Amino acid sequence: MTTTNEYAYNNQSTAVLRRWRNPGDVTDIPRALFASGYNWLGSSRYVEDGSFLRFRTLTLRYSVPTSGLKKMKIKNLSAYITAENLITWTKYTGQDPEVELPGGKPFAVATDVSVTPPVKMLTLGLTASF
């Protein structure tokens, strides 16, 4: 709501470029009213489908066969790669569809405050036992 309320000097979404400007304009964004009006109040124009599917974690591991390790006096040797937050499929227009409820209250209204989405991480590892 704060990214399209046109109420203060905070950053606004590019959606406000569709705002109402002249009589006869047909749009889903009301006219800009700096520090007045009621664009900052919650309404049904802010409700959208927040369903999503996120590929959160993928780990691939290769264990070296023990027959070749005995000569080097190694019991086990393996390498792995882990990727986190690879991709999110959604039609949600906000930054991250995984919006938290305020205070963890189950019946509270979830408000998207444009939190940065989870970072994509790649981890490489080597495990050995002697």
Image (cartoon, rainbow, N blue to C red):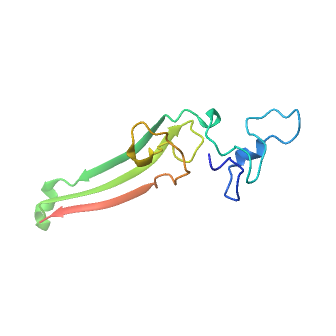
Q: Is residue 21 left or right of residue 87?
A: right
Looking at the picture, does residue 67 appear above or below residue 27?
below
User: Looking at the picture, how far across and down is residue 68, in whole percent?
Assistant: 16, 58
Q: Residue at x 10, y 62 (%)?
A: 70
Judge by depth and name the residue closer to the eye, 11 or 128.
11
Judge by depth and name the residue closer to the eye, 26 or 79.
26
Viewport quadrant of the C terminus:
bottom left
Q: Quadrant of residue 104?
A: top left
Q: Quadrant of residue 100?
A: top left
Q: Is residue 75 left or right of residue 23?
A: left
User: Looking at the picture, how far across and down is residue 52, in whole percent?
Assistant: 48, 36
Q: Is residue 114 left or right of residue 106?
A: right
User: Looking at the picture, how far across and down is residue 120, in whole percent?
Assistant: 45, 54
Q: Residue at x 26, y 62 (%)?
A: 126
Viewport quadrant of the N terminus:
top right
Q: Is residue 13 left or right of residue 129?
A: right
Judge by depth and name the residue closer to the eye, 126 or 84.
84
User: Looking at the picture, how far across and down is residue 49, in whole percent?
Assistant: 54, 32
In the orientation shown, which residue stands out farthest toward the right? 23
Total marks placed: 0
Looking at the picture, does residue 109 appear above or below residue 14?
above
